[in-house]
Image (spheres, rainbow, N blue to C red):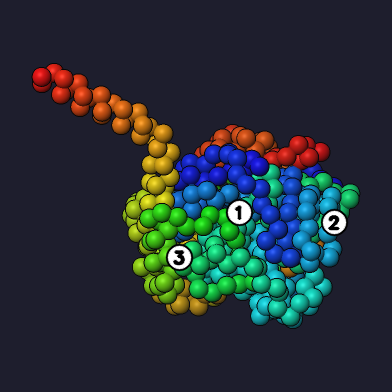
Amino acid sequence: MRHRLPQEPRPPHGHGTDASPKVRPGVPRERPVEDPGAPWERPAQQRDLSALSRSGVRRATPVFGTAAPPRGLSGVVRRLAYRMPEHRASRWALLFGADRIDVAEHRLSGAAWLLPAVAALAAGFVLTARALRR
Amino acid sequence: MRALVYEGPYQVRVREKPAPRVEHPDDVILEVTRAAICGSDLHLFHGLVPDTRVGTTFGHEFTGVVAEVGPGVRSWRAGDRMVVPFNISCGTCFYCRRGLYGDCESSNPMNDLASGVFGCSHTTGGYDGGQAEYVRVPFADVGPMRIPDDLSDEDVLLLSDVLPTGYQAAEMGGVREGDTVVVLGCGPVGLAAARSAWLLGASRVVSVDRVDARLEFARRWAGAETIDLRAVEDPVDALKALDGGRGPDVVIDAVGLEASRSPWRTLLGKKLKLKAGSAVALEWAIHAVRKGGTVSIVGVYCPPANVFPIGVAMNKGLTLRMAQANVKRYMPHLLDHIRKGRLDGTSLITHRFPLEHAPHAYQLFDAKDDGCIKCVLVPSARGLN
């Protein structure tokens, strides 16, 4: 299956095999296709639309992804962005902004385990300060 | 399951996350055997694609073994091996009926830009990708191709994106016998485009990059002449000089939004993200190609906008062609080229890692260290065949 690699720049095996546009799969660019794997006129609708509604997306396609539904402040900004027409730069700027907020929220939530320790230290500091004042 | 998870720019980790489930009757759940890292994954990794959410699993080039089938699936059974196109397409919408699978309107509710794509930002539908032990594959009877028994997963892995995208780039260039074709970028897609330009009958193919190992690979694997960007003062002059100052017939932009060599584009587009990356390669392509020539764009650009010399393109009478590849349309044709030894994607794979080493693989691929052309992750024990 594997052929020997040429050592100097020169045409590899198969040079000109697809020279005729007639054998190129993408020529013409648009042509009628009947797909045997798709018996439907329109595909069935994916049932649970909650991931879309949480994103603020109003159009449901027959299938869609549910990888990371929006959450927190970044989710609020994403919902705001999806209310704007996609030809507006502000929509994309808001999505970029939401991405950065998302990262910040993730890092803050990752540090949540520190909160009890910080609270205990603060309480200790306040109590010590009060005791010393007496 | 174990999966690569995005946690912010330049940060990916491998973590536990819930395994995918059948969410639509025509879904298949695939146990992933091979998942490649693509240059497009680096754009996500760098935080340059809008609506890239923390927790998303990347990966749109993968093969696998069917683990579970939805009730509507007719052509797949548990244990079947498949290679999956990166576009998710329904087969019957306005676009699919015209062969434009990359524009399918049944799989991306987020906007009107493109079809759904695995493991990308939510701008392409919000699907998790294949850099995981398992992945959900919608419309399983439409897009994926059965892996022939006599071929390994790696033999066909790059039919999921790299080879069709490279081939379509050359095809969109309208390459004719006798043409001089310049390919900007010697990443996997650029290399595949260079090799495809020969298949389409080019008489001269010139690859451009600034990484020694990649230039060497372009000479050996794609049989191309090369231009080292570090050795030329003005890339446009160097490219125009190829045809006596007139310029090449076709220039293929296989770089996209992360091109370097322009401080202001780097600052505004890549660092401050005030525009969609840095369109340096596209600018060079438009200036370098001959009048009446064709610029073919497969390097990824993102919304909302970029600055490029449309006035030059108009006055030179250029043809600008661009698209996400319609992968399914090319798979059978390119499989034939693979079988006949005319296109060998396996040789592009230079590095393999278990899924747990994915963060290191991203760093390596990003830095283009160690002669890295293509990194492939092996997520499951079943992949060690």
Query: Which residue is nearer to you in this view: B384 or A98?
Result: A98
> Could you tell whether B132 is left or right of B312 in the image?
right
> Which residue is tagged 3?
B303
Mark closer to the observer (3, 2) = 2
> Which residue is tagged 2?
B77
Q: Earlier in the sequence, mark 3 or mark 2?
A: 2
3D distance between C-alphas at marks 2 and 1:
22 Å
- Residue B198, numbered label: none
Q: Earlier in the sequence, mark 2 or mark 1?
A: 2
Q: Secondary structure at mark 3?
A: loop
Residue at x-position 41% and y-position 54%: A72
Residue B47 is situated, as x and y percent measured from the top left of the image, at 45, 51
> Which residue is tagged 1?
B128
Residue type, numbered disc 1: Asp
Q: In the rendered structure, are the residues bearing label 3 and label 2 in contact, judged by CB atoms less than 8 Å apart?
A: no
Residue at x-position 74% and y-position 65%: B26
Residue at x-position 39% and y-position 47%: A105
Q: Are marks 3 and 2 on the same chain?
A: yes
Residue B76's image quarter?
bottom right
Taking the view exactly as shown, the residue that stands out farthest to the right is B150
Q: Earlier in the sequence, mark 1 or mark 3?
A: 1
Mark 1 is surrounded, within 10 Å at the Cα level, by few (under 14), some (14 to 19) or many (20 or more) other residues, namely many
**Quadrant (top left/top right/bottom left/bottom right) for the C terminus of chain B:** top right
